[in-house]
Image (spheres, helix red, strand yellow):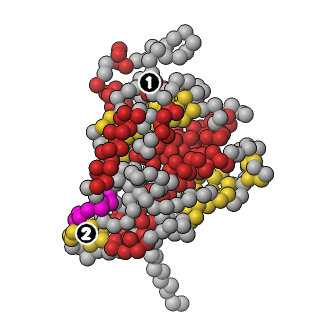
Amino acid sequence: MPKLSFIFVQIASMAGNTFGTLLTLTTFGESHGTALGGIIEGFPAGITLDFEAIQIEMQRRKPGQSAIVTQRKEADEVQFLSGIFEGKTTGTPIGFMIPNTNQKSADYSHLENSFRPSHADYVYEKKYGIRDYRGGGRSSARETACRVVAGALAKQMLPNVKINAFVSSVGDIFLEKPYQALDFSLTESNPVRCPDPETAAQMEALIKEIRKEGDTIGGTVTCVIQNVPVGWGEPVFDKLHAQLGKAMLSINAVKGFEYGSGFCGARMKGSTHNDRYANDGTTLTNLSGGIQGGISNGMDIYFRVAFKPVATLIQEQEVLTADGRIEVQQGKGRHDPCVVPRAVPIVEAMAALVLADFSLIHNAYQGK
C-alpha cells in the first residue's frame, strides 16, 4: 500500500480583531478598501438610540475637519445593517458599515516595495507575507472609526456616566491646570481639543509649524470619567485599570498609559500617597485615580495616554527596500502632523466600551 505524505504549510492569519468580554466589538476593513465596519454583540435590547449623537462622535474623529489634521475628505456616515428595529436595539448583533469614499491609493504606490521606519509596514510583510500598502491597510488609524461607532453606542448604555477626554500636551507644551479647574464644554471650541483656550492656541501654532516642516509631533490625551459606581472591575487579571490600559494601548500610535498618580506616585511616600477616607467612604484625595484593587471606588477615574509622532513624514527620510537597500524617500499622501486632536473621541470610545462591558459583568454577578 503506497505511503501517503502530507505537506503542512503554515499560513499566518490576523487574530485579535475582537475586543470585550460580554459586550464585544469585532471590526473589519482597510483604509483604502470598499468600507470599514463592525459587529457589536451583547448589546442589551430595548435601548432607544440617538443616531444624531452617534454621527456627532464620528464628526469629531473624521479626517479633514480642520487645517491641522489630514485633509482626506470622508463623510464617515454610519450605515446600520442589523440589530436595530424602529430605533431600538433588539439584542441581536448590531452590524454596521462605514463606506470609504475618498481613497487616493496612487499616493501610496511608492510604498509597495519599501518600509517606512517606525511603521507597521515591515512587520506586516514579515508576518503575513503580504500587505495592503495603500494607506497602511489594516494598520491604518482609519480602523478606529469603527471603535467610535461602538463607543457612541456604549455611551448610550451609560447615561449617568460622564466621559470627557481632552488634549493635555502637544510636544513640550503642557496644560498645567488640574482637570477640576477646567470647563470641559470648551474642549470642542478649538481644533486642538484642549479646554484651555490659551494653551490650545499655543498647541495649534506648534502643530502648524511642524506641518510646514513636513514633520510630525506627539502629545498626550487625558480622560476623566465621573459617576462610575463602586464595584466595577474584577480582581487579579481583569482589573478595571488593566482593561482600560489594554483598550488605550490598542489605539494606533499609543506608547504609554498611566492612571491616578501614575509614574509620579513612584516617587512618593505611602504616608503622602494614601487616600484617606471620609465617613461616607469617599476619599479626601484621589491619587488612586478612582480605582482600588482593580475595582472602581466611586471617585473620579482619570488617566493619561501618550501618543507618539506619526511615523509617515512629508519630508525625506531613509527607508528600507524589499531587496535590503537603504534609500532616501519623501513621504506622500495625506497624513496628520499630530494625531492627538482626532484621538480624543477614540479615547472616549474605548473607555466607554470598557465601562459598558464591566457594567454588564457587574450586573450578571448581581443577578440583574
Question: Looking at the picture, how far across and down is residue 106, in whole percent?
Answer: 40, 74
Question: Looking at the picture, how far across and down is residue 210, in whole percent?
Answer: 29, 51
Question: Looking at the picture, how far across and down is residue 256, in whole percent?
Answer: 36, 42
Residue drawn at x 41%, y 57% as measured from the top left: 70
Q: Earlier in the sequence, mark 1 or mark 2?
A: 1
Q: Please state if 49 lies on the left or on the right of 224 as rendered.
A: right
Q: Magenta segment: does it hold 188?
A: no
Q: Is residue 263 above or below residue 103?
A: above
Q: CA distance from mark 1 to mark 2?
A: 46 Å
Q: Which residue is mark 1?
A: 181
Q: Magenta segment: does it hold 316?
A: yes
The label number, if any, that marks residue 329 in the structure image: 2
Neighbor class of circle 1 (other Cα within 10 Å; few <14, some 14-19, many 20+) is few
> Which region of the structure is painted magenta?
311-319
Q: Please state if 310 lies on the left or on the right of 302 as rendered.
A: left
Task: Give the secondary structure at mark 2.
Answer: strand
